[in-house]
Image (cartoon, rainbow, N blue to C red):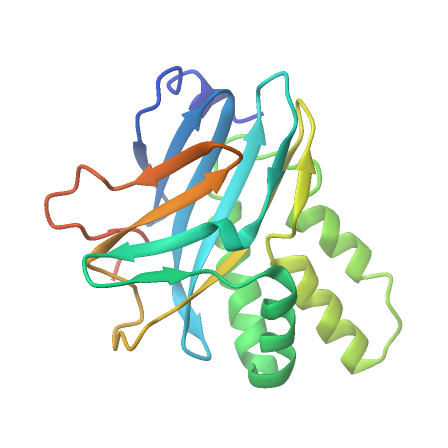
Amino acid sequence: MFALLFAASATAQVIEYEANGQKYQTLTRQGLTVILTQLPNHVAGYALFQVTVSNGSQVNWNILPDQLSYVRSDTTLHALTANQVVNLLLSKASSGDVIKLVSSYEQALYGIPNMRSTNGYEYRRQGAMSYGMSTKLRAAATASALVLAPTHLTPGQSTDGAVFVPMGGHESKMLTGGHVVFHAGTEVFDFNVDNPSGSVELGAKK
């Protein structure tokens, strides 16, 4: 699982790669590998990041979506909790928004080499399909399947999901001018810290 990425991630160095026009960054600290990409679409004023986490260590990790933030020189934009994202999608996102988000998310997810998540989107999506025909129930299930849920990762497990970050008045579809910081336990995963422009430069090609 993620063999191609793990082989190059023995040190805590951000590794960039591109697949099917989508740009990814990966960073490993203490055996925990985080893969990050910014999705090209946004929903209700929120930028979207896909986060994939795999535990290659011998200890357990607690993964929380609201531990991700987008840091610029003038502000820090904190991600929503999983419950806040589900409520947002149910109250403000149209069915078309959700369909586009699912399509974009799946395209980015399947671009990760040797992707085999143990309890991520694919696992949650199978559970969502078991819901009845109620439109509201299916919408809630789909939203829950997409979101990076709070997860207790044991050794060998992995998860993935979408993380929502407020645009903070940013007019573009993609957040730029800053970098992404993700916390897991006492470890800090800082992406793009060596980028002179400070731009996250993640997402689909235009």
Q: Is residue 161 visible?
A: no
In this rendering, the answer to whether 116 lies above or below 141 is above
Q: Residue at 57% across / 21% down in the picture?
A: 56
Q: Residue at x 26, y 74 (%)?
A: 170
The quadrant where residue 106 appears = bottom right
User: x, y percentage for residue 108?
Assistant: 47, 50
Quadrant of the rendering where the N terminus is positioned:
top right
Up-down relation of residue 147 to residue 32 (above or below):
below
Q: Which quadrant: the C terminus?
A: bottom left
Q: At which x and y percent is residue 103?
A: 54, 63
User: Which one is nearer the viewer's eye here, 122 or 183?
Assistant: 183
Give the image location of residue 4, x and y in percent: 45, 22
Instruction: Judge whether residue 68 can be spotted in this image.
Output: yes
Q: Is residue 88 left or right of residue 18?
A: right
Question: Picture coordinates of residue 140 (x, y %)?
Answer: 73, 72
User: In the figure, 84 relative to 114: above or below?
Assistant: below
Q: Is residue 141 left or right of residue 176?
A: right
Image-quadrant location for residue 131? bottom right
Q: Nearer the viewer, residue 204 or 15?
A: 15
Residue depicted at x 87% and y 61%: 130
Residue under the image location 81 percent in, 62 percent down: 129
Residue 105 or residue 151, whichever sits in front: 151
Q: Is residue 116 toward the left or the right of residue 128 in the image?
A: left
Q: Is residue 101 above or below residue 69?
A: below
Q: Residue furthest left?
A: 196
How many marks are shown on the rendered structure? 0
Which residue, as the protein is rendered here, is positioned at the far front?
A: 186
